[in-house]
Amino acid sequence: MNPTKAYAAHSATTPLEPWTLERRNPKPHDVALEILFCGVCHSDLHFARNDWGMSIYPVVPGHEIVGRVTAVGAHVKKFKVGDLAGIGCLVDSCRECDNCKDGLEQYCAEGAVFSYNGMERDGSGVTYGGYSKSIVCHEDFVLKISDKLPLDAVAPLLCAGITTYSPLRHWKVGKGMKVGILGLGGLGHMGVKFAVSMGAEVTMLSHSPSKQADAQRLGAHKFVLTSDEAQAKSVMGYFDFILDTVSAEHDYNFYLGMLRTNGKMVCVGVPPNPVPLHSMSLIFGRKSLGGSLIGGLPETQEMLDYCAEHNIVSDIELIRMDQINEAYERMLKGDVRYRFVIDMSTL
Ligand code: NAP
Ligand code: ZN
Ligand code: ZN
C-alpha cells in the first residue's frame, strides 16, 4: 500500500482538511496516475455535506481527474508510463450484465463502483476520489486524453462533460430542435457548448441576470431570466427538449410548461429534497420527464474525442487545494464561472 496525500471531509459540518489515504499497488490490469488536475463538481459538495444521506466518512471527493501514468500492471495494453489519462465517476463494474455489455457501466445491475464513496468489489473498502496526489484504477475505466487541449480545462469533461453530452446524444438533439439548458453552472455551460455544436437552437434558462453575457459568449442563441414573469411567459410551450442541471429545489411543473407537445425534459441536477410533480404537467401535451446519469466508458471516450475534434473544453477557474472550502461556498452562491479546477501540485 502507498500512503497518498489527500483532502477529506470528516463529517457533514466540518471543512475539508488534509488527510492521508492508502492507494493499492497496481495489480496486473491496473494503471497508476499522478493526478495533475481535478475538477470540482457540485456532487462533491453534496457528498462532503451528506446532502443525499449516503456519505461514508471520511469522504475524499473528486471525479474529474486528469494526470499522467506513473506505473502500469504487467497486463495493461492501453497505456504506458508517461501517457496522459483521465478517470471520471466510475472505477469498476461487473462487466457481465446487459448494461455493462452495452457500455452503460453507470447502470451496472450489480451497482457500478463510483470513484469516491463507493465500495470496492473485492471487499477492500471505500473508494477515495481525486482530491489526492495519485490514484490506481483498472485500465477499463481509464480514458485516453488528447494532448491537443489544455489539460486543466479538460478535467471537467470527465463529469460535467459526459453528463450533458450523453442525454443530448441519447435524445438526438440536433439541427431544427429548440433546446433549453436550465441552470448555468458547471454542467449547464457544457450543455450549452455541446447543444450549440450539435446544431440546435439553444436558450439559456437561468435565475442569474448577471450570466446573460456569458451565456451569449458560450454560444447560446437566447437568454431567459426565469424569475422574470414576462421572459418566462415568452417561452411557454416553446422547447422540444430541456436539460435540467439545477442543483437546488425548483418547480418541475413550471419548466414542463415550457415544453411544446411531445417535448421532453431530462433531469441531471439532483436537488437534495424531492419536489412534487403534478401529472397534469405531463398529460397536457403528451410530455415526458426523464433522467440521465453521467455516461458509460465508450461514450465518455467518444465525448473526449469529440471535444478534441471540436476544440471544446470547460471554462475554468484554477484554485489551490487549500481554497476548496471557499470554492464550495462560492459554488452554493452560484459564483463560479464555470468550473473550479484544483491544481493538484498545490497539495
Ligand atoms: P453548479 O455548477 O453549482 O451549477 C448549478 C446551477 O444551478 C447554478 O449555477 C444555477 O444556475 C442553478 N441554481 C442553483 N441554485 C438554484 C436555485 N435555487 N434555483 C434555480 N437555479 C439554481 O453545479 P453542477 O456541478 O453543474 O451540478 C449541478 C447538479 O447536477 C448537482 O445537483 C450535481 O450533483 C448534479 N450532477 C448530476 C450528475 C448526473 O450524472 N446526473 C452528474 C454530475 C452532477 P443559474 O445561476 O444559471 O440559475
Ligand atoms: Zn460530477
Ligand atoms: Zn454490470
Image (cartoon, rainbow, N blue to C red):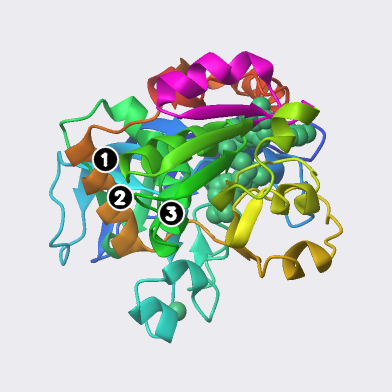
On screen, residue 150 versus residue 241, left or right, reads: left
**For mark 2, does the 10 Å Cα neighbourhood hold few (<14), some (14 to 19), or many (20 or more) residues?**
many
Near-viewer residue (69 or 246): 246
Q: CA distance from mark 1 to mark 3?
A: 14 Å
- Amino acid type at circle 1 is Cys
Is residue 240 found inside the magenta-colored segment of the image? no
- Amino acid type at circle 3 is Leu
Is residue 226 found inside the magenta-colored segment of the image? yes
Residue 204: x and y, percent? 56, 33
Using the image, determine if residue 288 lies above or below residue 312: below
Q: Secondary structure at mark 1?
A: helix
Q: CA distance from mark 2 to mark 1?
A: 6 Å
Which circle, 3 or 2, is nearer the viewer? 3
- Amino acid type at circle 2 is Met
**For mark 3, does the 10 Å Cα neighbourhood hold few (<14), some (14 to 19), or many (20 or more) residues?**
many
Res. 168 visible in picture: yes
Q: State the residue at coordinates (38%, 41%).
A: 194
Q: Which residues are magenta?
A: 206-228
Q: Pointer 3 and pointer 2: residues touching (CB < 8 Å)?
A: no
Residue 234: x and y, percent? 68, 35
Near-viewer residue (228 or 344): 228
Residue 327: x and y, percent? 62, 21
On screen, residue 144 versus residue 346, left or right, reads: left
Q: Secondary structure at mark 2?
A: helix
Q: State the residue at coordinates (46%, 26%).
A: 341
Look at mark 3 in the image and give the residue it sits on. 168
Near-viewer residue (49 or 19): 49
Q: Which quadrant of the frame does ligand 3 lie within?
A: bottom left
Look at mark 1 in the image and give the residue it sits on. 307
Which circle, 1 or 3, is nearer the viewer? 3
